[in-house]
């Protein structure tokens, strides 16, 4: 327990409140979409109805890479990134490294998408940022991730904003810890029969305190990711290498092998993927080839963290001979403190280090963070209600955002399911989201009371949650037997989760109605 | 020192001051941190630690009862790291001249 003097405690209470009130609603949007984005892969499978199980790297890829290399300019053989796209299709980005006039390091080249029969279904040219946009079949998960990462604001401003939100969350988490005079007592105190203000305060305090370590980790890792490329890399490159980001990248990620530009055909890539599978027990998540067609070519195979580990695994192969070279840390050429810390930032932020279990925990704690953010805003408003009636607009805004945002995300999901078979999901997913946001805002203006507004929005959320699995089936998505037969139980799991969550929301509304409560008990400000 | 002056010193060092000084510390750290086994610790650790450095500066500015100490610590760290970066840049042409 930390005992601050009275003045400092008052200051920390003010810092805690204002850090939430100034950026709380944006933070809520980032945390809510981040919570959903934890399951971005599963949502992608569910929404697009992918029924191909297994990895694209379990199929032969060697012939495809050689054929595409033959039709790609030689300068784009400097690097080839291979990864899975859509329903077991292969994405290949042949590229070379360039430094923009601004000093930013970019990859420019040709991006192919190849279906499971080896046919090129898409070919695009440009920088990585140009070609890796949302596709018709991943528009929903891309939309979720893009909202979380940069709130759809162009880079670098979107990343800077989410980085600042991460710092605000860090401040709220640390100041929240400092203002607890009786931390261990507070985390077990839920006074159900106390006044509504105390009930809300207890719930906010309990949820906030239990999720405090998680909030700290998320805020720290999230702001690291946001500031890494936008601010951190340019400044470190300036200080260490006179601003040359290419030299910094080579120093951190580079291969110490001596350059050997002699022409030499690459070894069998299928042998490499098979060997990587044998060594790690799973197919690569990503494959990278450096200097394709040269004697010094190297193939790096990236894998999820192994059992009981939190750092991803990386294997390096000699490209020309397709023989195993070494296990490499994710960052740097040899194990180091800095490399290990940087490497675990991703798993800690995405919660993917122990499969579905860690993802479920991260999702649950993300939900707790959303709850803490909203209840915190409500408590702040409640304390000032008597002195400042002009804050009623903020109270209404909290209701509109708090319940309107999840509703808009569900409407976007419904629009995606309807538009994907027509090939127009990239347009309709964000369009439906914006339409639903506008409707929620309009409802905020038109509703007589906050209670009515929240009730209507929650009923809509419950109904949509129940309707989404039905819409998925009606628009041609695979049924449960087909999904299970194909080894994709995640489709059924997401359906069930939605039905249970929707039923739960409606049940709560019904129970509130029956017990005569006018407002949502959890988020109710004291009258 | 008037309470108003103390308040503005606190706001200055917790707000823009913490951001600027954290970025300068990040730049300066690349020059004194040990390179580590892989030769990258001095490049990677500042990138990883900058949110925590900012938070430490922010909370120190909020919680230290003596504004003079807040200014001393923050400006001391700023001067040390800005000086290291400046020395590196000023040193570079001299090194080239020497090679000639």
Image: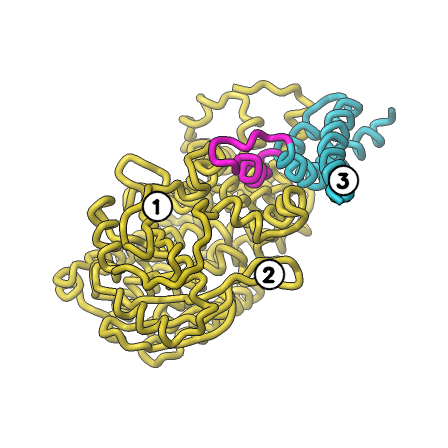
Q: Mark 1 points at which residue?
A: A314
Mark seen at residue A99: 2
A393 inside magenta stretch: no
Q: What residue is rendered at 43% in x and 61% in y?
A: A79
Chain letter for the residue marked with disc 2 in the picture: A
Q: What element carries label 2?
A: strand
**Are the residues under marks 2 and 1 on the same chain?**
yes
- Asked whether A40 or B30 is in front, the reply is B30
Residue A111 % position (x, y) = 42, 70
Q: How crowded is mark 3: few (under 14 residues within 10 Å), some or many (20 or more)?
A: few
Residues shaded magenta:
B32-53
Q: In this view, does A71 lie to the left or right of A62?
A: right
**Colouring scheme, one of rainbow, by chain, secondary structure, one colour:** by chain
Chain letter for the residue marked with disc 1 in the picture: A
Query: What predominant SS class does the magenta segment belong to?
Result: helix
Q: Mark 3 points at which residue?
A: B98
């Amino acid at each position: 327990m930390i005992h601050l003097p009275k003045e400092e405690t008052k200051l920390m209470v003010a810092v805690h409140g204002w850090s939430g009130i100034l950026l709380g609603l944006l933070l809520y949007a980032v945390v809510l979409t981040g919570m959903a984005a934890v399951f971005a892969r599963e949502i992608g499978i569910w929404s697009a109805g992918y029924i191909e199980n297994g990895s694209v790297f379990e199929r032969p890829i060697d012939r495809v890479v050689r054929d595409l290399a033959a039709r790609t300019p030689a300068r784009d053989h400097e690097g080839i990134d291979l990864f899975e796209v859509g329903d077991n299709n292969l994405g290949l980005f042949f590229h070379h490294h360039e430094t923009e006039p601004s000093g930013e390091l970019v990859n420019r080249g040709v991006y192919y998408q190849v279906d499971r029969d080896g046919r090129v279904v898409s070919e695009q040219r440009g920088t990585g940022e140009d070609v890796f946009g949302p596709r018709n079949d991943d528009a929903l998960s891309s939309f979720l991730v893009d909202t979380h990462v940069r709130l759809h604001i162009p880079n670098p401003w979107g990343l800077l904003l989410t980085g600042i939100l991460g710092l605000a969350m860090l401040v709220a988490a640390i100041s929240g810890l400092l203002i607890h005079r009786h931390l261990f007592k507070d985390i077990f105190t839920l006074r159900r029969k106390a006044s509504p203000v105390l009930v809300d305060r207890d719930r906010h305090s309990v949820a906030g305190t239990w999720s405090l370590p998680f909030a700290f980790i998320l805020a720290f890792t999230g702001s690291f990711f946001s500031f890494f490329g936008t601010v951190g890399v340019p400044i470190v490159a300036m200080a260490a290498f006179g601003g040359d980001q290419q030299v910094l990248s080579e120093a951190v990620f580079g291969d110490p092998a001596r350059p050997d530009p002699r022409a030499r055909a690459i070894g069998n890539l299928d042998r490499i993927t098979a060997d990587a599978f044998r060594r790690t027990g799973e197919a690569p998540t990503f494959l990278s080839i450096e200097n394709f067609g040269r004697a010094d070519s190297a193939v790096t195979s990236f894998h999820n963290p192994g059992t009981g580990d939190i750092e991803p695994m990386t294997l390096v192969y000699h490209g020309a001979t397709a023989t195993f070279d070494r296990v490499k840390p994710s960052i740097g050429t040899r194990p180091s403190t800095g490399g290990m810390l940087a490497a675990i930032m991703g798993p800690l932020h995405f919660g993917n280090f122990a499969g579905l279990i860690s993802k479920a925990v991260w999702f649950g704690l993300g939900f707790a963070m959303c709850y803490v953010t909203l209840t915190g805003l409500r408590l702040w408003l409640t304390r000032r209600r008597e002195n400042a009636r002009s804050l009623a607009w903020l109270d209404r805004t909290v209701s509109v955002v708090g319940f309107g945002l999840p509703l808009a995300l569900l409407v976007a999901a419904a629009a995606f399911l309807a538009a994907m078979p027509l090939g127009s999901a990239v347009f309709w997913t964000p369009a439906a989201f914006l339409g639903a946001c506008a409707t929620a805002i309009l409802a905020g203006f038109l509703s007589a009371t906050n209670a009515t507004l929240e009730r209507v929005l929650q009923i809509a959320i419950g109904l949509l949650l129940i309707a989404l699995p039905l819409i998925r089936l009606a628009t041609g998505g695979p049924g449960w037997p087909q999904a299970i037969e194909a080894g994709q139980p995640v489709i059924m799991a997401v359906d069930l989760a939605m039905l249970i969550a929707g039923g739960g929301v409606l049940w709560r509304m019904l129970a509130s109605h029956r017990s005569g409560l006018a407002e949502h008990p959890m988020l109710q400000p004291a009258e | 020192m008037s309470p108003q002056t103390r308040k503005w010193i606190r706001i200055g060092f917790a707000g823009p001051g913490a951001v600027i000084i954290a970025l300068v510390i990040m730049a300066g750290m690349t020059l004194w941190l040990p390179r580590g086994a892989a030769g990258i610790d001095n490049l990677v650790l500042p990138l990883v630690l900058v949110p925590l450095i900012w938070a430490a500066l922010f909370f120190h500015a909020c919680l230290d009862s003596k504004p003079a100490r807040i200014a001393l610590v923050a400006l001391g760290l700023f001067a040390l790291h800005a000086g290291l970066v400046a020395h590196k840049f000023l040193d570079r042409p001299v090194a080239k001249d020497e090679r000639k």
